[in-house]
């Protein structure tokens, strides 16, 4: 039986933002989960929070991304790698 681990919104934001100082650590943590036979799990609330922070202006503690970029990044997170 495979274990499951809920991914926090911050992990998604760090994965999608190479400029974040936590980017490498988030990538390494998710890689360890996958290498250890742990299934990362996403829920609607996490994706909603990702969207909210990604599209919020940087001056208001967001990333300030345009909607198109936020959608591309969320799609990339949701698309399994081949």
Image (tube, rainbow, N blue to C red):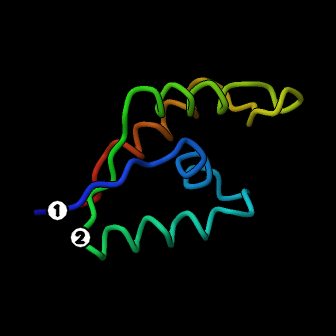
Q: Quadrant of residue 15?
A: bottom right
Q: Quadrant of the C terminus?
A: bottom left
Q: Nearest the camera: 24 or 40?
A: 40
In the rendered view, would you say 8 is above or below 20? Answer: above
Secondary structure under tag 2 reads loop
First-in-chain label (1 vs 2): 1
Q: Residue at x 27, y 64 (%)?
A: 38
In the rendered view, would you say 41 is above or below 49? Answer: below
Q: Quadrant of the N terminus?
A: bottom left
Q: Residue at x 67, y 26 (%)?
A: 55
Is the C-beta separation of discs 1 and 2 under 8 Å? Answer: yes
Residue 74 position in % (x across, y down): 46, 37
Q: Quadrant of residue 61?
A: top right
In the rendered view, would you say 25 is above or below 82? Answer: below
Q: Which mark is residue 54?
A: none
Does residue 35 appear to the left or right of 54 in the view shown? left
Q: Most extreme residue toward the right, as rendered?
A: 59
Q: Mark 1 Cα within 10 Å, few/some/many (few <14, many 20+)?
A: few
Q: Mark 2 Cα within 10 Å, few/some/many (few <14, many 20+)?
A: few
User: Badge 2 is on which residue?
Assistant: 37
Does residue 65 appear to the left or right of 78 in the view shown? right
Q: Nearest the camera: 36 or 63?
A: 36
User: Badge 1 is on which residue?
Assistant: 2
Residue 17 position in % (x across, y down): 64, 51
Residue 11 position in % (x across, y down): 55, 52
Give how far apart the Cα atoms at labels 1 and 2 are: 6 Å
Q: Residue at x 39, y 48 (%)?
A: 6
Q: Residue at x 56, y 29 (%)?
A: 49
Secondary structure under tag 1 reads loop
């Amino acid at each position: 039986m495979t274990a499951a681990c809920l991914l926090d919104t911050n992990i998604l934001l760090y994965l999608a933002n190479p400029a974040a100082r936590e980017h490498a650590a988030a990538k390494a943590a998710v890689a360890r989960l996958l290498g250890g036979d742990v299934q990362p799990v996403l829920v609607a609330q996490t994706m909603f929070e990702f969207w909210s922070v990604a599209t919020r202006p940087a001056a208001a503690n967001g990333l300030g991304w345009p909607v198109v970029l936020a959608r591309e990044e969320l799609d990339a997170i949701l698309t399994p790698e081949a």
